[in-house]
Amino acid sequence: MTSHYLEQFDAFLEQAPLVAILRGLRGDDAIEVVQALFDAGVRLAEVPLNSPDPFDTIAKLASHFAGRMLIGAGTVMDAKEVVRLSKVGCAFIVSPNADPAVIAASVAHGMVSLPGFSTPSEAFTALAAGARHLKAFPAHDAAPRLAALSAVLPAGVKVLAVGGATPKDLGALWQSGVCGVGIGSDLYKPGRTPEEVGKRALGWIEAIQRRASSAASLVCNPQTMVGESPLIVDGDVLWVDPTRPALLRWDGQHCHTMALSEPVWALGLSNGGLVGNGEEHFVRLDVDGTIHSGPHIEVGPGCRLNDLVVDGAGGLWAGSMHRGLLAGRGAMFYAPSVDQPARRVADGLGVANGMAFSADGHTLFVIDTLSRTLLAYDADIKLGILGEPRVITDFLGIPGKPDGMAMSPDGRLWVAMWGGDAVIELAANGALLRSIPVPAHHVGSLCFDQGGRLFVTTARARLSPQALAANPGSGGLFVIQP
């Protein structure tokens, strides 16, 4: 039997992917509390059966909000309770377990069943009993296992995460296939005023909408071992894999690969032309991938060039690193153009990586991956010199290592976290503003297009078969709409 409420439940879930769990709600203030939720945009609310007079409260709410909200029951573990709930206007049944009898009774009486599960076996037991919605419990740190499960769930099955979810978890949960969350004590507790409940609900709805729309989507996967330095050229995305070596281009539909005669580690645009970093010289690249090399750069024994940025006057600034990752051997180099000699302008770095100029061109931001720091140099692009660096942040507590970096259209720094499965946005003082999960462990670099879309390159290097199976998009190009 098809649920009487299924279509409306799914529509409300899409509109506002949150189920309010009102444990302890009393009938005398139920209308005011749920009205505050409705005003904030919530359209699904459940009253657990271990609340005072739950059947009377559900009946009152179902009658008052008929057609505008769906009211469900939570902590339902007995099929006899399902029959009673079906007579008071209850629209959906939420259970802490996957009891086939409760699921079958819910479906038989026209209600949506949301059985709880924590293992794949429990999930498939629930589906076999007739459920089409599942409640993953607990939600905290559940994204990796839910991502693996979503790959094998039948089409059309919807998973909601309940228990311990925080706004910081939302991006990872949505990326793992979750389509909604259940929020309890962080939203409602007995004694909390309707005004406070509404304010909290509004915060959750805004956080969900922001995180859900920020999920990273795979646009193509050329399976790069090291995907580096994406760049927008005539509407296409160009990036490099120095291990092949190859220049890659995504035209909005297809990915094209052009072999290169030598490794190119970074790309830039100088005076309308495509330039980059070879191992020990700057290069100019033709559209067909032909390389024209500039003068040799004395990068030092065992070192090579790494990342690159072009200033507003077309000057090239490159960082270097020691191939054996020896500390203090990295440096910064500057040349007015590919064809002119480069000179060393800074020393003492570990792995000089992602770079970006401030909007006024007076500050050069540089990632030192080896020391896990973001540095800021006073820069004079006319003279091609740098001042002493200052540390903006050490990325304390942020998983992974800082790698590539880009400046957003609104002037924020965004950093790719290698080994951290994410890109992050930083405030001017280096504080973490937000982290957006990317379903690839090694996130290498990133760039913005004119519309504000964020393109992210990833890598397959040094990932085990198990890690690649868990993140099949590794080595691909992703897009995020922040």
Image (tube, rainbow, N blue to C red):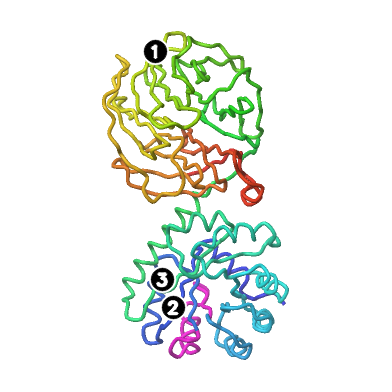
**Quarter placement of the N terminus:** bottom right
Residue 114 vs residue 476, the one in the foreground: 476
Residue extent of the magenta highlight: 49-73
How far separated are the C-alphas under marks 3 and 2? 11 Å
Disc 1, SS? loop
Left-right relation of 386 to 48? left
69 versus 281 height, above or below: below
* Residue bearing mark 2: 22
Magenta residue check for 9: no
Q: Nearer the viewer, mark 1 or mark 3?
A: 1
How far separated are the C-alphas under marks 2 and 1? 64 Å
For residue 438, the mark is: none
Report the residue at 51% width, 63% height from top.
17
Residue type at mark 3: give it: Leu
Report the residue at 59% width, 41% height from top.
462
Q: Looking at the image, is mark 2 or mark 1 earlier in the sequence? A: 2
* Residue bearing mark 3: 37
Q: Residue 232: where, in percent of width, then height?
A: 52, 28
Crowdedness near tag 1: few (<14), some (14–19) or many (≥20) residues, C-alpha within 10 Å: many
Q: Looking at the image, is mark 1 or mark 3 earlier in the sequence? A: 3
Disc 2, SS? loop
Residue 451 vs residue 444, the one in the foreground: 444
* Residue bearing mark 1: 336
Q: Residue 244: where, in percent of width, then height?
A: 64, 27
Residue type at mark 1: give it: Pro
Q: Residue 277: where, in percent of width, then height?
A: 50, 20
Q: Nearer the viewer, mark 3 or mark 2?
A: 2
Q: Residue 385: where, in percent of width, then height?
A: 30, 18
Magenta residue check for 69: yes
Residue type at mark 2: give it: Leu
